[in-house]
Amino acid sequence: MFTKRLYLRMETVRNSLNFFTGSISDNLQKSSGHSWLVPALSALGLAVTSFFIYFALNASMIADDFSYFNIYMGFGNPVVYVADHYMTHNGRIGQASLFAFTFAIFGKASVQIVPILLLFALISATAYLLRSFFPLGHSPWLVSHSVAALLVTGALVLSPSMFDSYLWLTSSTVYLGGLSFTLLAYCFAAYLLRSGVTPIRVALLSVLTLWAGMFTEPLAVCTGILGFAMAVWGFYCRNISARLAGLSLWVGSMAAFIIVYFSPGTAVRRRDLGIDVSLNKIVETIPYNFSLFFNNSQWWGYLLIAVAGIALYFFSSQTSWVRSSPLRLLATSGAILFLYFFGHMLVSMMGIPHLAFRSFSTPAFAVGICSFLVVLAAMSPVVKHSSEAFTLRFAGLLLALALIPGWNYIQTISSALTLRSDHLELREKSIAEQVEAKGQGSPIEIVPVRIALVSQAVDLNPNTRSQIGWAVRSISEWYGLNPDQISIVTEPSDYCLPESPLLKPELICSQVPAP
């Protein structure tokens, strides 16, 4: 069996290499004259993935990152750090472990490396799920990973603040880390549905779901509801695999929620924040949070998702999902939206009075999947797979539309990240020069480093008085300074950026006062 699997894997790799290295005529015959779409789709998926890798490589420390690094270095041991985090900060063992062990391995470089690893994990897990439910015919590995790259990056663009959800290490380990391990649990559940269950497999799925649920409480609740629905469906259809896989997802996620929500650290956090959120207040803020999400989402994400949907429809003519009624697809997308957007929002507000931008990371992926299913539903009655010419023209038009705003998006983020990186480097150099010139213990002037992209993370912005004391202590400890010797000076206004909804208004050129 192992030899056969190894042979099949080698055949897949060989075919993929042949596809890129010269067997174009063979692929043209196999794909009925439209094989150019596979390399085009692969190139687009590789391009958008490369852009997000570039963003991650230019990320830097912000907000909680300083505090987390300081605490970890004080303990110097991942296990001790996780235990202290659980007892005093919050119960998110999964996030604390991911942060501590990656920092132990990569050090400060984890700020750049971890988001890249999470991006690859999300793309790989999504690609596996696509291959599990959509027979993709020719080049399934390339097609599934290309479509998955568009879905994942599109969902990240749909987040109200990509800085909070992807480029902020502390935040990305919570939300993207939780999503990554949750999708891996879904992949294993899909494997059980196809290959059957055994006691060991069921136990492994429960453990994996438990681990995924200990990243963030709302995601654990959503997974629990999904697992319960799968178990009910398994009992109804008398499908033992669905029944046991669903029960594993339900039990593991609910156990994770209990461990996190009722932890000593979560109790401390709720007491310190003075959280008292009533059900009436939660219900009243639903329209506001719903509009907050869509008003801060970028349309480029929807275009990437539309291209992914059309590409999948084109390559999966035999799948029952694509050929099923549009009403079924729309009902499925509506259920996902309700479960992952509203469910996540309600549980999030039980832990914080106001829904932060970073809390929208999971709903952004739910909205991405919903949009993806809506595209499939719209394609089904309008375009048949025999209408290849129309399908290709439609895909090409959407591809062109996706690239136009995408270029502006890329330029804006690149400029903002370069600005932040340059100012952070200048501040570090300035602190070192002042310490050398004035001596240890002398007053040190520090200029706030601006986070140009829309974000709720703070550095040393004097306008956020509730955060300034905590930020000064964290950053001063990182630089080895005494908080009492720090003097925060007004930031220079000798720079500005082009107008964009991605940027904070005070950094837009037309809003910056003349010096």
Image (spheres, grey):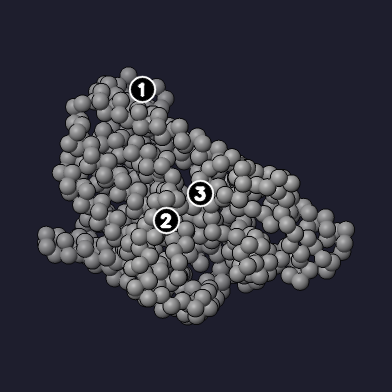
Residue receiving disc 2: 292
**Which residue is drawn at the image coordinates 45% and 50% (left, top)?**
296
Residue, x 38% and y 55% (percent of image)?
291
Q: How crowded is mark 2: few (under 14 residues within 10 Å), some or many (20 or more)?
A: some
The answer to whether residue 17 is left or right of residue 473 is left
Q: Nearer the viewer, mark 2 or mark 1?
A: 2
Q: Identify the element where label 3 is drawn.
A: helix
Q: Which mark is residue 23?
A: 1
Q: Which of 179 and 509 is in front in this view?
A: 509
Q: Position of residue 242 (x, y in %)?
A: 20, 60
Residue at the spot of label 3: 116
Quarter holding residue 178: bottom left
Q: Tell me if 491 is positioned left or right of 97 in this view.
A: right
Q: Secondary structure under badge 1?
A: loop
Task: Report x, y in % for residue 315.
Answer: 26, 34
44 versus 134 height, above or below? above
Whichever of callouts 1 and 3 sits on the residue coming sooner in the sequence is: 1
- Helix, strand or loop for disc 2: helix
Q: Nearer the viewer, residue 326 or 189?
A: 326
User: Which amino acid does the dot numbered 1 rest on?
Assistant: Ser
Near-viewer residue (471 or 10): 471
